[in-house]
Image (spheres, helix red, strand yellow):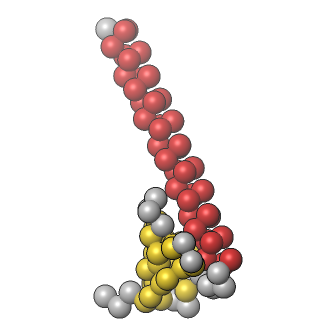
Amino acid sequence: MGNAIDKLKQLRHDLVSGQKQIDDATATGKTSLMNVLKAHGIKAEKVLEFDLNGNGIFLMGGKKYACQIESDGVSYGEIKA
């Protein structure tokens, strides 16, 4: 019985540790996207979402915008839905 409890405790620890790593990576990704947007003169206020392909959603002036990081800059447009 003690062995099963120890395994459950270890699994919980692993899940919590894994979630922290995901949260840290997400924060780093959002910060990186914000830095790219600002470097291109885009006055983003907050990055809401991003993916590893260079796509993201950010707030600017109270509106949501979708963006795509490209080799020659950043394209973006307001989300009107």
Residue 58, x across and y down, in percent: 50, 77
For residue 3, which quarter of the picture?
Answer: top left
Residue 62, x across and y down, in percent: 51, 89
Residue 6, x across and y down, in percent: 41, 15
Residue pictured at 47% horizontal, 75% vertical: 68
Q: Can residue 45 be seen in this view?
A: no
Residue 23, x across and y down, in percent: 52, 50
Locate the N terminus and report the quarter of the image it occupies: top left
Q: Going by the picture, which residue comes out furthest to the front?
A: 72
In the rendered picture of this protein, how many numbered marks are placed on residues? Answer: 0
Locate the C terminus and report the quarter of the image it occupies: bottom left
Q: Image check: 67 left or right of 80?
A: right
Residue pictured at 48% horizontal, 67% vertical: 54
Task: Please determine whether, in this image, residue 9 is positioned above or below residue 24.
Answer: above
Foreground residue among 33 and 19: 33
Q: Can residue 44 be seen in this view?
A: yes
Task: Please determine whether, in this image, residue 29 is positioned above or below residue 11.
Answer: below
Foreground residue among 73 and 16: 73
Residue pictured at 45% horizontal, 30% vertical: 14
Residue pictured at 37% horizontal, 22% vertical: 8
Foreground residue among 39 and 12: 39
